[in-house]
Image: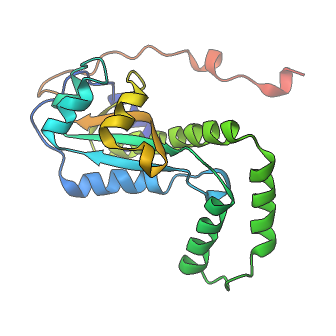
Amino acid sequence: MSLLSALSNRYAIKQFSDKKVDEEKIKSITEAARLAPSAFGLQPYRLIVITDRELLSKLAGAAFNQKQLPTCSHLFVFAAETSITEGTVDAYFARTYEQTDNEPGSLNGYADYIKGWVSSQPAESLAESAKHQAFISLGLLIGEASLQGVDSCPMTGFNPAGFDEILGLAEKGLTATVICAVGYREEGEATPQKVRYASEDFVINGNKLA
């Protein structure tokens, strides 16, 4: 199945069936999110996976009691880092030297360049950028879920502060940014007709704007 075919078949499930997603598919879905691009490769966010029914019900209270949370197979919580510092850059290059053939210290010039950029930005802008990048990862997660035949519902309708408190994210330097419930639709449930901009209205020829 192509990605376009998979996306054409998906829609935002509001209430999932009892069928659970097997762990091999979850592994593929989370791996797609992990491999998402991010600014300088820093990945200033984490992906939290929740299946505990009691915890899901508790989190539903911080999400306007929407039915996706207590009925989903798995809930993904994208949590952005609240503080992006030179230490964030150091941690990235430590991973780089560990996972690649680059000699330790060989990329110091590039590291200093990134640190210079980080130090020149307001802390609030960096934190906001981290949230934006989490959405890129979300997009790849949704795409892979669709390819795996798994239904999904991305959600911004929740109380981040409530999630942070329930999950203890503040002490981890994280804040809930966007969530995505996954599972399966009820058997025989048809895919609603999609309503989107026509291609010619959605895609703008930028060469003609100037």
Specify the quadrant that holds the N terminus. Answer: top left
Q: Is residue 95 above or below residue 196?
A: below
Q: Nearer the viewer, residue 177 or 30?
A: 177
Image x and y of residue 98, in percent: 55, 79
Question: Where is residue 90 drawn, in percent x and y?
Answer: 64, 67
Residue 104, placed above or below residue 134: below
Residue in the picture at 33% in, 25% down:
11
Above or below residue 152? Residue 120 is below
Name the residue at 64% across, 62% down: 87
The residue most toward the right is: 210
Q: How many numbered discs? A: 0
Please indicate, yes or no, whether residue 121 appears anywhere in the rendered image.
yes
On the rendered image, what quadrant is the C terminus found in? top right
* Rendered image coloring scheme: rainbow
Q: Between 102 and 116, which is closer to the camera in this rendering?
A: 116
Q: State the residue lying farthest toward the front.
A: 171
Residue 81, position in %: x, y? Answer: 53, 47
- Tell me which corner region of the image, top left, top right, bottom left or bottom right, holds residue 72: top left
Q: Position of residue 192 (x, y in %)?
A: 30, 16
Q: Residue at x 27, y 24 (%)?
A: 13
- In front of the other: 47 or 151: 47
Residue 184 makes an appearance in the image: no
Question: Quarter-wise, where is residue 105 in the image?
Answer: bottom right
Picture residue at 51% right of the left edge, 43% below the top: 80
